[in-house]
Image (cartoon, rainbow, N blue to C red):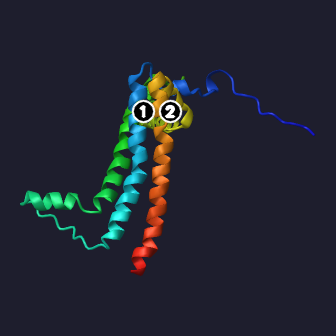
Amino acid sequence: MTVTTTPEPSGELRIRPEQALRPGRSDARNLLIVWYVRKSFYTWVFLGGIGAITTRGTTDVDIDWTEPNKLLGEFLSPLVGMILAVVVRLGSTWVALALAYPLARKHDAPLEPRTGFMSGVGQWFDRLHVAKAYRSLRWTHHVRQQALGRFGTTGRRVSKLDPIMDYVNLSLAVLFLVSVPVFAAS
């Protein structure tokens, strides 16, 4: 039996999780805050779905901007969970991109610079694509573990939040899937 091993990349090609974080604790803290806010998206989706199912769509979304009490009532409607989920997801995506942008500026590839018409815009778009790649890299488990490691004991405590949120989201998903046929039958 022949075992084939893939050679490990060497030099600058190897991606190390610590390279996806800026020095210090502030970038790690910001990454973790955005990660947990982003992860709450599923909680809000399922809570909004459960709220919409249990009220059977009897809430009207007719906002009267002249009366503050009616406006507050609309913000407490079951559909606000779904709306909040979308806002959380989009907002966390843009904030994470803004947090990854300094890394993209710091790590320029030794390539020949762009020239010609609209080269400045092209350079900006190239850097934006690199920032998106850093944003995706920063979502990985290994980079988040590096970020948590910068906080010592506090990081170990905070790391327990990830599986707790997984269990809550899974429980809400099951509750949502069970409530659909129950409320549809009644």
Q: Identify which amino acid the numbered label 1 is placed on.
A: Leu
Query: What is the x, y in percent for residue 145?
Result: 53, 30
How many residues crowd around disc 1 within 10 Å: few (fewer than 14), some, or many (20 or more)?
many
SS type, badge 1: helix
The vertical placement of 163 against 56, above or below, is: above
Q: Is the Cβ of the residue at disc 1 closer than 8 Å to that at disc 2?
A: yes
Q: Quadrant of residue 54?
A: bottom left
Q: Identify which amino acid the numbered label 2 is placed on.
A: Arg
**Disc 1/disc 2 C-alpha distance (Å):** 8 Å
**Residue indicated by mark 2:** 144
Given residues 27 and 151, the one toward you in this image is 151
Q: Quadrant of the C terminus?
A: bottom left
SS type, badge 2: helix
Say whether residue 112 is visible: no
Query: What is the x, y in percent for residue 115?
Result: 45, 30
Residue at the image position 60 percent from the left and 28 percent from the top: 15
The vertical placement of 61 against 41, above or below, is: below
**Residue indicated by mark 1:** 31
Q: Quadrant of the N terminus?
A: top right
Residue at the image position 45 percent from the left and 51 percent from the top: 168
Q: Is residue 172 left or right of residue 48?
A: right
Q: How many marks?
A: 2
- Disc with the residue nearer the chain's start (1 vs 2): 1
